[in-house]
């Protein structure tokens, strides 16, 4: 009750601020003692994101203790004569200011007081989590029951609400679909401040709108996520450890590489790998391959000793096989061997390791710690993520990997295919119109004091050239984690889904209050 009163009093102050449109210095005079914070440190951290390319300060930051706190604030923004922008912020790992709220309020969902412990239903194999929960904490909770979510992102320090607002993909997506295909139900605060529970068969229009909806239709305050048994290996009689086998093999031929990737994701109802990804190796070095710690000094051969053939580009297929209670090392050996026999990688280029399941899922965090220790994590990240249709991936390789990129990439380049039938077309996400499409992720870091090739300006220009190349050659790409700056570009992005996207916006956020940092709709205040 006391907390509610504090929030109400803070909101009253906000009404005054909005109503009179005070100067920011006046805002600093307003109290800092409750959930609505005007602290410099809160404002500053909400004004930045992982991309580090754009700083936009909100008026205030809300640390909600519950869905009703979120609802009260959104209602105020919706009902007040002047209105103001409200953006949920998970872990702030966007690239282009998507969770910022110019002159508005950022709702800090991750690490907020609203965080309650995930609640696992062992019987029904799901977990209920707060929208700001980080995936690493979801994993830790569910493993206590021997269970784990089915579909992941490569990095676990992202919020549930943040990844569900995009799609949430990794090497399991070919099999289970993206994370948005593995959610039973969500609780959402709409742009009118209503708290609505929705699912495939309940308020389904809102459910589908919010999945991959870039925060445009509501703020996810709770999600019910599907679980499966976590991979376990019996190490002694009844002693089990969560374990997977992680394998990498190399290719010099792009067509050989994609042929094998596509083969591996086409295996339905038969033995298959549990995770299929891949990456392009243009050159070695920490900043270029920070995800590749796997290639250790104990490797049988050095990557540099492998002849890359025509161009100097190598492709690495990355796969895992889960241990299950019945499968000892021999049966895993046999299954892996049988699958590898069907592939055409460079002989002798197999790198294998068994490791704890958590270490595999949390692998990028290890790389993060390494980069942080060298001051290479908090730098600008002009990332570009594209969905490329299967029929044009070879043209993309010629034009981009072997063309525009040259031999300096400044970050990992991921490439892996997914099956479109694992994506629900009723959601807000757009993907290429082919049965199989690739994610190509150019995860680059700009180093201002480094070589000319690695500057933000240079990398941003390269991104523009890649997008132009795709446009001019009608490659049919769609941006993942999209960034567009005009409504016309957004209309092109959504294509035939635009009328539905627009209609949903008018229904669920008619004043265009939510997630204005995406720059899709002009706020109507
Ligand atoms: P934020 O950046 O805080 O928010 C992103 C958007 O979602 C904003 O518009 C915000 O308003 C909205 N939003 C946030 N929370 C909510 C909520 N509760 N309800 C409604 N809207 C909300 N993505 C993948 O799919 N696969 C990967 O493997 C992957 N790896 C990554 C690795 C790193 C190192 C980084 C930095 C990003 C990676 N991403 C990946 C991208 C990531 O999924 C998105 O950037 C995601 O939005 C980040 O989550 P966040 O919690 O930081 O969201």
Image (cartoon, rainbow, N blue to C red):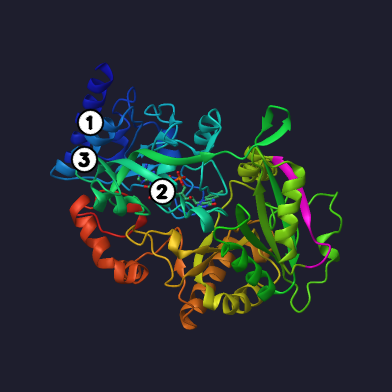
| Rendering coords of residue 427 (x, y %) | 34, 57
Q: Is mark 2 within 8 Å of ligand 1?
A: yes
- Foreground residue, 113 or 262? 262
Does label 2 or label 3 sit earlier along the sequence?
Answer: 2
- Regarding residue 509, the answer to whether it shows in the image is no
Q: Residue at x 73, y 41 (%)?
A: 328
Residue 349 lies in magenta, yes or no? yes
In the rendered view, does 387 fall on the left or right side of 508?
right
Magenta-colored span: 346-355
Q: Which residue is mark 3?
A: 193
Where residue 164 is drawn, which disc sits there? 2
In the rendered view, does 154 fall on the left or right side of 319?
left
Q: Give the mark toward the camera: 2 or 3.
A: 2
In the rendered view, does 223 fall on the left or right side of 6?
right
Indicate the secondary structure of the residue bearing disc 2: helix
Q: Which residue is mark 1?
A: 11
Task: Work out how far the residue at label 3 is from the one at label 1, CA to CA, in angstroms.
Answer: 14 Å
Q: Choose top left, top right, bottom left or bottom right for residue 503.
A: bottom left
């Amino acid at each position: 009750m006391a907390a509610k009163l504090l929030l109400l009093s803070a909101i009253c102050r906000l009404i005054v601020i909005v109503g009179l449109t005070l100067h920011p210095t006046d805002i600093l005079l307003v109290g800092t003692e409750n959930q609505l914070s005007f602290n410099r440190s809160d404002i500053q951290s909400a004004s930045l994101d992982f991309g580090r390319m754009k700083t936009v300060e909100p008026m205030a930051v809300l640390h909600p203790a519950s869905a009703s706190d979120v609802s009260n604030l959104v209602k105020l923004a919706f009902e007040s004569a002047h209105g103001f922008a409200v953006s949920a912020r998970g872990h702030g790992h966007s690239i282009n200011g998507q969770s910022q709220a110019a002159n508005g309020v950022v709702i800090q969902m991750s690490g907020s007081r609203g965080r309650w412990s995930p609640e696992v239903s062992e019987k029904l194999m799901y977990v209920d989590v707060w929208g700001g929960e980080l995936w690493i904490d979801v994993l830790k909770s569910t493993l206590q029951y021997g269970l784990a979510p089915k579909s992941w992102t490569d990095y676990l320090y992202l919020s549930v609400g943040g990844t569900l607002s995009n799609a949430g993909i990794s090497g399991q997506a070919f099999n289970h679909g993206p994370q948005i295909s593995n959610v039973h139900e969500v609780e959402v605060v709409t742009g009118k401040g209503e708290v609505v529970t929705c699912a495939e068969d309940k308020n389904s229009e809102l459910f589908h709108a919010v999945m991959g909806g870039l925060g445009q239709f509501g703020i996810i305050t709770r999600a019910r996520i599907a679980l499966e048994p976590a991979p376990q290996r019996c190490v002694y009689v009844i002693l089990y450890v969560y374990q997977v086998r992680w394998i990498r093999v190399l290719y010099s031929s792009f067509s050989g590489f994609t042929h094998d990737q596509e083969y591996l994701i086409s295996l339905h109802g038969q033995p298959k790998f549990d995770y299929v990804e891949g990456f392009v190796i243009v050159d070695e070095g920490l900043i270029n391959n920070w995800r590749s710690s796997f290639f250790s000094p104990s490797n049988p051969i050095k990557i540099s000793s492998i002849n890359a053939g025509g161009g100097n580009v190598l492709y690495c297929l990355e796969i895992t096989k889960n241990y299950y209670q019945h499968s000892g090392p021999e049966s895993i050996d046999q299954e892996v061997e049988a699958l590898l026999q069907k592939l055409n990688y460079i002989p002798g280029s197999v790198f294998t390791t068994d490791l704890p399941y958590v270490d595999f899922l949390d692998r990028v965090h290890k790389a993060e710690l390494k980069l942080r220790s060298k001051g290479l994590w908090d730098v600008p990240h002009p990332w570009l993520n594209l969905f490329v249709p299967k029929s044009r991936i070879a043209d993309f390789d010629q034009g981009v990997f072997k063309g525009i990129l040259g031999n300096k990439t400044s970050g990992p380049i991921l490439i892996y295919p997914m099956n479109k039938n694992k994506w629900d077309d009723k959601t807000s996400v757009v993907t290429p119109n082919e049965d199989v499409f690739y994610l190509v992720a150019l995860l680059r870091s700009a180093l201002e004091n480094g070589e000319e090739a690695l500057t933000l300006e240079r990398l941003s220009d390269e991104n523009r050239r890649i997008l132009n190349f795709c446009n001019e050659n009608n490659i049919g790409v769609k941006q993942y984690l999209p960034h567009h700056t005009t409504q016309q570009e957004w209309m092109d992005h959504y294509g035939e889904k635009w009328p539905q996207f627009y209609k949903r916006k008018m229904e669920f956020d008619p004043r265009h209050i939510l997630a204005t940092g995406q720059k899709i709709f002009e706020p109507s205040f």
